[in-house]
Amino acid sequence: MNAIIETGGKQFRVTPGDILRVPKLEAEPGAEIALGKVLAVFPDSGALVTGEAAGTAVVNATVSGHDKGDKILVFKFKRKKQYKRTQGHRQDYTEVRIRDIVA
């Protein structure tokens, strides 16, 4: 069984046993959580379930840990004006393991 969920403004396709990096969630490592909004469910029968029927589905997950992503450099530059600015950014994320999809 597969599902498409939305959390942190991003959409992910998940199956039981997957490990995902989602934008930071307020939960302790080892905590059991229900992930975001379920947009669609693909049962083993092959049918696509969307809309209100998919809204009743729940994706359960376990928080594995928190960390930061790789550093991204933001560089601003204006030619002939002696203007340069460099800034780094590391996005926080939460690693979760999908336990099951209850439809």
Image (cartoon, grey):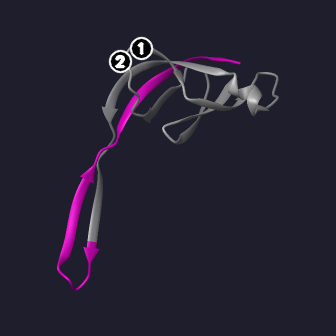
Measured in 3D between alpha carbons, the distance from the residue under mark 1 to the one under mark 2, in whole angstroms, is 6 Å
Outermost residue on the left side: it is: 82
The label number, if any, that marks residue 28 in the structure image: 2
The label number, if any, that marks residue 31 in the structure image: 1
Q: Secondary structure at mark 1?
A: loop
The label number, if any, that marks residue 65 in the structure image: none
| Residue 9 located left or right of residue 72 | right
Q: What amino acid does circle 2 point to?
A: Glu
For the N terminus, the quadrant is: top right
Dominant secondary structure, magenta: strand
Q: What amino acid does circle 1 point to?
A: Ala
Residue at (51, 42) in percent of width and height:
9
Q: Secondary structure at mark 2?
A: loop
Residue 101 within the magenta-colored segment of the rendering: yes
Q: Which residues are magenta?
A: 77-103
Label 1 neighbour load within 10 Å: few <14, some 14-19, many 20+: few
Residue 87 within the magenta-colored segment of the rendering: yes
